Amino acid sequence: MLVAPSILSADFGCLEREIKSVCDLGADYVHIDAMDGHFTPNLTFGPVVVAAVAKAASKPLDIHLMTENNPFFVELFAPIKPEFLSFHIEEEKHPHRLISRIRDLGIRPAITLNPHTSEQAIEYLLCDLDMVLLMSVNPGFGGQKFIPSALEKTRRLKELIEKRNPNCLIEIDGGVNDQNAPALKEAGADILVAGAYIFGAADRKKAIESLK
């Protein structure tokens, strides 16, 4: 299992230290929720802050766009060169075009699904994706409770991936902890995003290892 700590739950007053901490303690990616205050009721990181995060991180970035006008934000964050750049299918009229653009920029494309969005909405895009991010909470704020139906959705998505593109990864974001991680692994998850569970832990190394 790969682990991507979400800096949404980090101490922003000591952000460089926080990022270096989780990278040194075993994180595989640094997960960044870039929210625009329109798609979600929260406003988080712009490219200047994310560029500073990239400089501090010794692990690749996984940028999750929670935005309207996705093509604009793709171009805005592309110079930072994250490993993954994901956008929400609910907000994109031309997803295939945007997937192709992300790949042309040298970044691995991913699509995110909100809890209510069926995995079937992206069946015919899977062959062009490197990852699908399933939200297991409603997007906007950290520290929310895991939505149990995400498990069944992960299993169904895994079946589609096996049929369409076995190399496509599944990432889960929202309420992830050591209690639901084994079931998520069994369902087919490859990467777990965790914010409060890691950054709020007394022993972050132990928290990361428990997910792995």
Image (tube, rainbow, N blue to C red):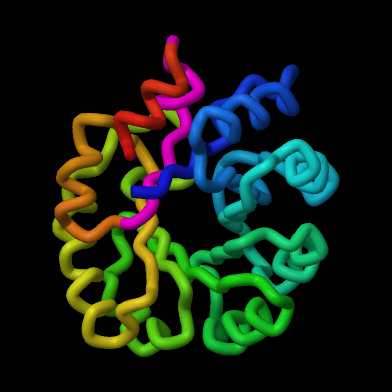
Q: Is residue 156 above or below residue 201?
A: below
* Residue 70 on the magenta segment: no
Task: Look at 60% across and 88% down and name the residue there.
Answer: 97
> Measured along the vertical axis of the image, is residue 129 above or below residue 91?
below
Residue nearest the viewer, comparing 72 with 163: 163
Quarter occupied by the C terminus: top left
Q: Write the residue at 74% across / 62% down.
A: 81
Residue 36: x %, y % from top left: 67, 50
Residue 192 pos. (x, y %): 38, 46
Q: Is residue 142 visible?
A: yes
Where 18 sits versus 158, above or below? above
In front here: 83 or 152? 83
* Residue at 63% over, 52% down: 60
Residues shaded magenta: 190-202
Give the x, y percent position of residue 208. 40, 31
Q: Residue at x 23, y 52 (%)?
A: 150
| 209 sits to left or right of 41 | left
> Between 143 and 181, which is closer to the camera in this rendering?
181
Image location (x, y in percent) of residue 5: 50, 37
- Please tell me whether residue 163 is drawn above or below residue 22 in the rendered image: below
